[in-house]
Amino acid sequence: MDQVTRDMTIMEVVNKHPQCIRVFYQHGLFCIGCSVAYRETVEQGAAAHGIEVEQLMRELNQAAGDKPGS
């Protein structure tokens, strides 16, 4: 599995693992359509929105392991 890391940009995660979009949305990170998502890392996005990065990383990596559409 291609792991999601905290230093990946949000759009890099979305492009590699579209199934992670729901995780971002569940945490209130609606920046998928925002230009900031192309340069902001997962860790920076979590910090900016007051989200616990370790929990977010666990959920993103769990979703990344799911097959799209499952």
Image: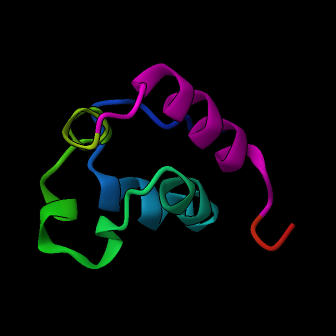
> Would you say residue 54 sits in the magenta stretch?
yes
Taking the image as shown, residue 61 lies to the left or right of residue 70, namely: left
Q: Taking 48 as reference, is 30 above or below it?
A: below
Residue that protrudes farthest toward the right in the picture: 70
Residue drawn at x 69%, y 48% as measured from the top left: 63
Where are the magenta residues, as a range? Answer: 50-67
Determine which quarter of the picture holds residue 18. Answer: bottom right
Residue drawn at x 19%, y 40% as measured from the top left: 48
Our reading of the magenta stretch's main secondary structure is: helix
Determine which quarter of the picture holds residue 32. Answer: bottom left
> Would you say residue 52 sits in the magenta stretch?
yes
Q: Percent from the top left, x then y, of residue 26?
A: 57, 56
Taking the image as shown, residue 7 lies to the left or right of residue 18, namely: left
Determine which quarter of the picture holds residue 45. Answer: top left
Residue drawn at x 12%, y 54% as measured from the top left: 39
Q: Taking 55 as reference, is 11 above or below it?
A: below
Of 13 and 35, the residue lying toward us = 35
Residue that protrudes farthest toward the bottom in the picture: 33
Q: Percent from the top left, x then y, of residue 10?
A: 32, 54
Q: Percent from the top left, x then y, of residue 61?
A: 62, 36
Location of the C terminus by quadrant is bottom right
Q: Percent from the top left, x then y, of residue 57?
A: 51, 30
